[in-house]
Amino acid sequence: MKKPVSILIILLLMLPQLFAQEQKIKISEVIETYRGQKVYIHFVEPGETLSALARAYGVSVDQIKATNPEAPEILKPYQIIMIPVGQSAPSKKPKEIIPEVKVLPGSTPAVNKEPEQNTHIIEPKETWYALSRKYEVPIKKLLEANPGVDTLRIGQVIIIPDLSEEIPSAQKAEPMDNVTPISDKPGYVLYTVRPKETLYGIARQYNTTVDELIRLNPVLKEGLREGQQIQVPSSTQAPQPSTDSRQQHETVSSQEPVASNQQKPVNYIEHRVERKETLYSISKKYDVSTSEIIRLNPGIGSVIRRGDVLRIPLKQLQSEEKATKTSPDTVVLGRDIYREAAKPLASSCTPGEDTRIFKVVLLLPFSLETLDEIITSGTSELPQPEEYRAFDFIQFYQGMLIGLDAAADLGIKLNVEVLDSDAGSSTVKTRQIISSGKLNGSHLIIGPLFAESFELVVDYASKQNIPIVNPLSQRAEILNDPQVIKIQPSPWTIYNGAARQLVDAYPDANFTVVRRNATENSSMAETFERALQKTAKPGHFKTVNYAQTHDQGIMNAMIAGRKNVIMLLTNDKAFIPAVLRRLYENQEKYDITIMGMPEWENMEIDIHYLQSLQAHFFSSRYVNYSNPETIKFVQEFRKRYIAEPEAAKFAFMGYDIARYFTQALYYFGPGFINCLPEYKYDGLSEQFRFYRSDKGGYDNAGMFVYRYNEFKRENIKPQPQ
């Protein structure tokens, strides 16, 4: 009985390989580490399915789904799928293994390579993709030059192949004019690729196809590069893009198939991309899918630019009214849209160049040096996660990543560099960053978060005219430089804004500021009093010193038949419950609304008092968890990081800062800082209302007053949705 069972097990083990051959799935050679697990980076080819991939890689469909929770049941061509590397990894042909070379300080690595090949020593966090971008060498060529090397290690020596011999001599020629005749090839000219051009766009200019251009220039299989010279037919002179809006929609009857495997011809119209349009917004305008547009426009990729001409399938055109509708729950090229936010701006500022790539540098105190250690003691002595300083601002960083992705979905082109800056009073790492030149060419710097490091970077940013954002400080002193943007409103701004919002919400109310004594929170009380004297109706404002008048002073200040807003500006844990109980007992006689300090929410105060007395609080930060945008962010955060985003850990703030400032760059260009007073933003937790302060920098006047209503927090000045 054992022998048939053994044969059956062997057959079952062989099935994945048999099916993989049947599906002709090419096993990826790119292996990365994702959440501590090694995974294959697989680019989905047309026709591939989850089950076919599972059989080819020797894993289960459930394993693939667990690693890719966002992956749909039906895979999309060219989608990236991570496949876990298991014990029964797919078989590959044996490769020659290059031994790892240990590099000593001051020594030159000895590597067996051809004279024309270069080498690179792997640094922390570098990947195959990063090397490919740095040296402009395809990942495939890097892997071929380094057989046997799958996972990169710090200090490892990697061979960088020299591809100059593979470039046709036509492309090595110095570009002179954009079009140059080829004397020995009648009917063809050399074309020099301009910045941001696509292969599809060049094919349209010269009335040819992408396939024909690749046939004439085989090197194009590796991609198109700025300054590259390629052969194009000379039968049609390249037209210049028209900016006439009247030519935006031109109906064309075409008998051209949209793909080699498509049998039926498709009629289409041409659409010229305008400023702030995205592939998603165009697809919704014409009620077609983004995949249909991409299929009819091979070579456009996921990013389009103003002036591009796209073919739009004619078969699904609908009325103009229906075409303008958008859906907030749509996925574009595998990414969630958090806001279809490219709304026209009513601004006198000059629009920026939205086609350029903006460099954004993020300086955060990750304290990575504290994680580079081996603990040999027992598990009982292991530090708790909260004891690691590296996690202090991790949620701020995670929120920023989601915000940057959401901005990229709108067509914003970003080069984001994240650097580990100093924590506390140390400035060693910050000085190294400045001297290294990594901040050069930045359009925006966010951080550092600590005062000494921030002052150093402000000095550099000021000389280079680079806007620099401080997310956490309330100190007005940092505004002495005109390049500084302070996110946190000053205490005076918050108190003054709270008083004004209360008067706006209850214009006929009777307002009373209650001090526990003459000294506690005196500057705060004086600010509230001055603001109320200016904004409240005459005779509708009073002050009470509780130490002198006790409960009777509050009772005498209230008026029956009118709403009474009582501002209790104290954090005394014994005083607060006693006063609230007395006010609660007098509700039948008086209509009472209280305003307390933000710290109250962390105290043990009877929630029924707060609910019944319509407790109001003021803060620079407020999260409305019923907001659809907040719900989407929370869901995405949970999905990515298997954690709950917390306002106290700045998760929502990170998203808002990334979203606001990258959009400001997109709308107004590098000079966006001058446009901040006109560019208002209501985010997930922050409200940005910037103004230029007397000191020169930009301060924020955005703040919130919220109340308890039906045991939930409610903003008294609702944000626009």
Image (tube, helix red, strand yellow):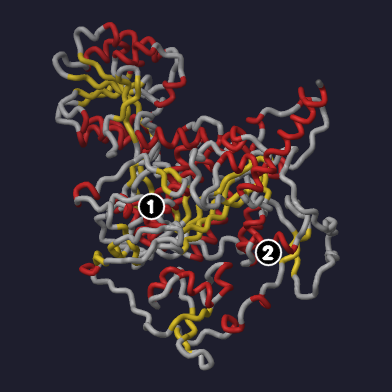
Looking at the rendered structure, the kind of residue marked 2 is: Lys
For label 2, the crowd category at 10 Å Cα-Cα, with few meaning under 14, some 14 to 19 and many 20 or more, is some
Along the line of sight, the residue nearer the viewer: 70 or 556: 70
Residue 560, given in percent of the width and then of the height, sits at 16, 13
On the picture, is 183 further left or further right than 128? left
On the picture, is 503 further left or further right than 131? left
Whether residue 80 can be seen here:
yes
Q: On screen, 559 above or below 508?
A: above
Cα–Cα span, label 1 and label 2 = 31 Å
Looking at the rendered structure, the kind of residue marked 1 is: Thr
Along the line of sight, the residue nearer the viewer: 179 or 386: 179
| Badge 1 vs badge 2, beta-carbon distance below 8 Å | no
User: Residue at 35% of width from left, 24% of height from top?
Assistant: 713
Along the line of sight, the residue nearer the viewer: 384 or 211: 211
User: Residue at 24% of width from left, 12% of height from top?
Assistant: 555
User: Residue at 60% of width from left, 62% of height from top?
Assistant: 133
Please identify the quadrant where the C terminus is shown.
Answer: top left
Residue 607, given in percent of the width and then of the height, sits at 38, 13
The number of discs equals 2
Residue 297, given in percent of the width and then of the height, sits at 40, 62
Along the line of sight, the residue nearer the viewer: 177 or 190: 190
Residue 605, given in percent of the width and then of the height, sits at 42, 13
The residue beneath circle 1 is: 290
Whether residue 473 can be seen here:
no
For label 1, the crowd category at 10 Å Cα-Cα, with few meaning under 14, some 14 to 19 and many 20 or more, is some
Q: Which mark is residue 141?
A: 2
